[in-house]
Amino acid sequence: MLKANADVRRMLIVSNRLPFTISEEGGGLTLKESGGGLVSGLSSYLDSLKTSSGKSKYIWVGWPGTTVESDEAKEQLKSIASADFSAHPVFLSEEDMENFYLGFCNKTIWPLFHYFPSYARYNNEYWEQYKKVNEIFCEALMEIIKPDDVIWVHDYHLMLLPRMLRDKMPDVPIGFFLHIPFPSYEMFRLLPRKWGTAILEGLLGADLVGFHTHDYTQYFMRSVLRILGFDHNMGQIVAHDRVIKADTFPMGIDFSRFHNAALSPEVLQEASELRYAVQIGSRVRDEGVELFPHPTPSPYTEGVKVVLSIDRLDYAKGVINRLEGYEAFLEDNPDWHERVVLSLLITPSRIGVEDYQRTKQQLEEVVGRINGRFGNMKWTPVLYQYKSLPFEQLVALYVVSDVALITPLRDGMNLIAKEYIASRPDKTGVLVLSEMAGAAKELGEAILINPNSKEEIAEGLREALEMPVEEQKRRNGTMQNRLRRYDVVPWAEDFIQQLKNVKETQARFDTKRLSSSVREQMRADYERARRRLIFLDYDGTLIKFVKDPQQAYPPTEVTDLLGRLASDRKNEVVIISGRDKETLQRWFGDLRIGLVAEHGVWIMPQGEGWRMIKPISNDWKPRILPILETFTDRLPGSFVEEKEFSYAWHYRAADPEQGPLRAKELLDHLVDFTANIDVQVLQGSKVIEVKSAGVNKGTAGMFWLSKDEGSKTEDSKHQVSTFVLAIGDDWTDEHLFMVLPESAYSLRVGITQSYARFNLRQQGEVISLLDELSRHSSAFSHESSSMGVSL
Ligand code: GDG
């Protein structure tokens, strides 16, 4: 069984980059741990996945960050990566990376998913390369994967991988987590349809798809509905033949790592030096305790404050807006001149993408403008660094900063905001945070601003700088408690636990799934039976649904199959449908089978004419029709089908979101309206039926079943009398399932709760099952018809 802490199963973590950088020293390769949110975040969780003997129970699979040419170097790297980092490298050439990483990942997906559609390039070569690299990852995984492994795929570089793996490993647990926003449908649909479809299908190859916020999860499910047509119920999606879950897991940080580092002597020393270096004051206060006595008095006034800004170089991080907000703040608040500095740290990133280089130039221009405009010999308003700092220096920056100003235009989560709060052991400091960052959903006590408004940034900054210490502590205390509780280990454990739950849900459905042993038994019972009664629903059971029900006439494959079954004289085949009797007559009239129309209003035993089981009236029809017509007018793509004793309001061809809403409204309306009329209102698959009460598929089925009572004979040897099989796909078939004898084989198509004894995953399985039975008919029973019970 898959356990949350995975001490039984091995975990394969798959991400674009492995958590180290490679350098060549003395002719050999040296691997050094690299930073980054995912890496630093996950490492403490992964540490918990060690056996008692210290052996890792995980393998990290990804690109090692550089092109490795020779086979010898590849082997060397493989063995060092495995020994030192428990990692398995995926080798990619520079050309692979060009169109894949710099291309599709960072010029198509990244801008689009961060709401920069004008930056997005739609280049077919990028797409082809994206597919190819996902395949390369799949092959690399197949080299090491074992059936008992748990796979956790990370981020937008590998959205096709879950499906590719699923095709090769149908049962292996696969989780996928997206670290960036999933955009709204309007943005996602900008992708060419073929790509968008493949990406969604790719993700649905996983068992669990996770996002940082509820909005991203909802947007994903909306795209799945609108593009693939799969609806969801509380995040559970039944796609093709599997249950998949989409859910929200706001990623946590390694809280104590930052918190403890902020108290460590090395970091405090570093912070003290920083404070001295920027000459902004002589002390960091920890509830009144002086931590850093300063050797010389500061040239600045006592109250000088540091405002922190740290980001990877990225246009989505909103650094230019931030600088403009800071500029507006300095403009509006001359009293703050010389009393505040903005410490701007930009970490190099995606060097080869032009949009990033442009962003760098622009932001450097604005830094120059602000310093030139407001600065003087004593004061540099923006202290700018373009580099990556070691961990201790990073935390030291968090420690010395009175305010963190984080204003991304879009950000999946933003870990810097969380790390800043965690690195304030005395609970002072103020976080000014963009409401466009996923982190804003959890950090409501921060000053939330809209990053598109420099006025809001300026005002937020002023409020932060003037916030009383008690208020700072109150807010940070609440945020720290939250971040401490749901830090990265519970986050990862929660994800893996949910993955386990999905697997259990799938297994529950699988227990009702027609297994090969039950199928074997069914075949044996079928063969031995003296008489066989086979009830088959039509739409969704014998054929797939189509948008226009009149186009759903039976293909030859189906009529041939029914003909074959019916030609065995032991068999009585009954099509039991909601359709009108004329259509059924036209389509199946030539076959030697029984028919039931309008959900049981009309029956036609084989070789006889149509008749009603009991007299029913249709006086109610003129009152119902106007209601249905009104709803038809209001929902393009819907229409009313009139039958003798019923109406069907179809909405399969309507908008997939609006359709169910209107259907619910109509249903409520009809239930109220028909309270005193002798009709029943049924909800089928994308159809609402109103029909005369008193008959249903169950009452119709009873007609054939009760005939059987009179003719019951038991084979003395096998104790088998009538073999009853019923297959249907929607809840109108449940009426039939309910009246069947216990020994009957009742099968519901689709993964859903049912009175049926067994589930078939998809419509195609109905055909193969009947085909198999019909071949048994032809092999064993045709010529023995004289032995059968006469029908
Ligand atoms: C993506 C999503 C989401 C930064 N500079 C230095 C440094 N860092 C570390 C920080 C932090 C990480 O890098 C940055 O994480 P972010 O969350 O801010 O942003 P992305 O890199 O864009 O990450 C983002 C994240 O994935 C996780 O799901 O939150 O929305 O875009 O951990 O500490 N670390 C060191 N020196 C630096 O100079 N040592």
Image (spheres, rainbow, N blue to C red):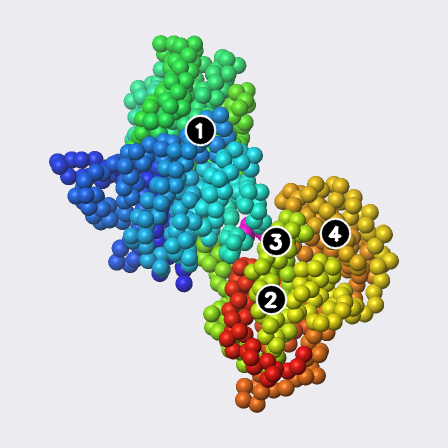
Q: Please, what is the dominant secondary structure of the magenta stretch? A: strand
**Disc 2 marks which amino acid?**
Leu
Q: Is residue 235 magenta?
A: yes
Mark 3 secondary-structure assignment: loop
Q: Is residue 494 magenta?
A: no
- Image x and y of residue 698, in percent: 70, 69
Is residue 315 in view?
A: yes
User: What residue sits right under mark 3 in the picture?
Assistant: 545
Q: Residue at x 45, y 50 (%)?
A: 205
- Image x and y of residue 265, in percent: 29, 36
* Lateral position of residue 482 relative to residue 633, left or right: left
Q: Earlier in the sequence, mark 1 or mark 3?
A: 1
**Disc 3 marks which amino acid?**
Phe
User: What residue sits right under mark 1 in the picture?
Assistant: 121
Residue 562 is marked as 2
| Mark 3 residue crowding within 10 angstroms, few (<14) / some (14–19) / many (20+) | some
Is residue 213 in view?
A: no
Mark 1 secondary-structure assignment: loop
| Mark 1 residue crowding within 10 angstroms, few (<14) / some (14–19) / many (20+) | some
**Quadrant of the image containing the C terminus:** bottom right
CA gap between label 4 and label 2 equals 26 Å
Nearer the observer: mark 1 or 4; the answer is 4
Camera-nearest residue between 363 and 269: 363
In this view, the residue farthest toward the bottom is: 716
User: What residue sits right under mark 4 in the picture?
Assistant: 641
Nearer the observer: mark 1 or 3; the answer is 3
